[in-house]
Image: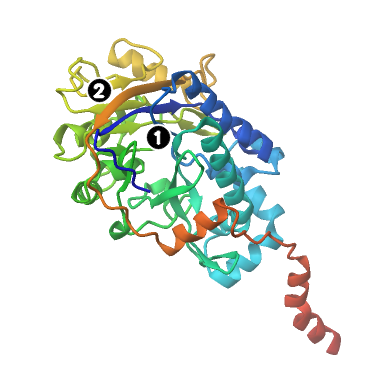
Amino acid sequence: MSERSPAGRNFRVIAVQPQWSAADFTSAAAFRAWLRSQLELARPHLAPGRPNLVVLTELNGLPLVLRGSGWVTRLGTFQRAATALFLTRLPRVLLLLLRERVSPIRALQLADSAENVRLYLDTCRDLAREYGVYLCCGSTPMPRYRLEGRRLVREPRTLHNETVLLDPRGDLIGVTDKVHLTPDEEAGGVDLTPGPLAELRVFPAPVGDLGVAISLDAFRADVIGRLEDQGCTVLLQPDANGAPWTSPEGLPPDPTNVRDQPVAWLESSWQATAGSQTIRYAVNPMVVGNLLDLTFDGQSAITARAEEAPELRSYVLTDPRPGFLALLPWVEEGPAERLREVGRHLAARSGHPHENCYRTGVLYADLSLPPSRVPTPPRTAHEEALAALLEGRAALPRSRPLWPLLGLAALPWVLRRRKR
């Protein structure tokens, strides 16, 4: 909800750069402890007497697909783990494959989506309340829902990379779906559904007129332009960069345009605040850590216009410049070739003594904005459903064992065999 003050808005933003591991997602207790540890990192930096906005990282709920099957983490790669999960959860996955005609990897995620969504949202709501903060929950794969009475009904086939924004009461401010997916998020990877550009909205709050551009979206002019047109003043960019930070980058629309990752990152939050007429600040937390055979690394940042952040600094492998209010150092400084070598040492399965030795930390900045003139957007049907869930007015149906249903499905085949 929009809260306007004639005296303007003074608040603090906090970006948390955590390290994850597969073990953080193998049980509900482990996941809650991992998310809580991030709010504990933020706690010493919370500003008393003013609103605080804590921003978490992208896809921090994706590995919940591992929940309840910690043994698969010993298989070493995400591909092997996903295959093993598919086979062991075949009763729940098979009907989704047949009924909704989705890929095996999307069916695997949808099969346990009710329990994982409930765990994710309940945990984030409880943390927002306990720490008294506005919370950008990061993002997680989430289906679309609609509310029918006191029950949430899932829309078939869809699975978005979605950010949820909560207020200090744990109530829903709004949600945003990622529009531009990376190749790893498309059909050849975890097979998510791209969000419609037309559904991107800005949410006015005491901590800014919030627009969310999840990872790659913050690099895209159509996303930034739509948020600017709606009066976005604070851009949130939850991120999970799935590559060594000092390795080359090449993404659509031109995968042959290979440059260092940090050079590419200047075209997201930093560029948005440097060139926008409306976006005053941007918050870009990045997760680090090797997740089985996958590598994640980066440098979290809070950016602003040059006149508000005149100190010269920048990502490694780039020249110092104004525009960074706060920037987490990388694990090392030095010549470019040395930094590229260190990035390879940190990466998954490098075998180096420094493998998985990333830097974690917290960034914060005190920001000021005039009173908001942005109207509160009407809620979508999906947001109405999530709000009811968070407030305890509705519930998600629990998954039921599907062996009996599979038995019924096989009954005609059995009867035919008996007649022979």
Residue that appears at 36% across and 19% down? 328
Residue that appears at 27% across and 52% down? 375
**Type of residue at label 2?**
Phe
Q: CA distance from mark 1 to mark 2?
A: 19 Å
Q: Which mark is residue 351?
A: none
**Type of residue at label 1?**
Asn
Across and down, in percent, residue 75 comes to 65, 37
Q: Is residue 35 left or right of residue 359?
A: right
* Residue 328 vertical placement versus 274 (above, below): above
Q: Residue furthest bottom?
A: 419
Q: Which mark's residue is nearer the viewer, 1 or 2?
A: 2
Across and down, in percent, residue 52 comes to 40, 30
| Mark 1 residue element | loop
Across and down, in percent, residue 196 comes to 33, 59
Residue bearing mark 1: 241
Residue 264 in sight here: no
Other-residue count near label 1 (Cα within 10 Å), few / some / many at <14 / 14–19 / ≥20 = some
Residue that appears at 85% across and 85% down? 418
Give the quarter of the image for residue 351: top right
Who is closer to the viewer here, 383 or 68? Answer: 383
Who is closer to the viewer here, 367 or 328? Answer: 367
Residue 399 in sight here: yes
Other-residue count near label 2 (Cα within 10 Å), few / some / many at <14 / 14–19 / ≥20 = many
Q: Is residue 70 left or right of residue 34?
A: right
Q: Is residue 380 left or right of residue 220?
A: right
* Residue 44 vertical placement versus 244 (above, below): above
Across and down, in percent, residue 195 comes to 37, 57
| Mark 2 residue element | strand
Residue bearing mark 2: 324
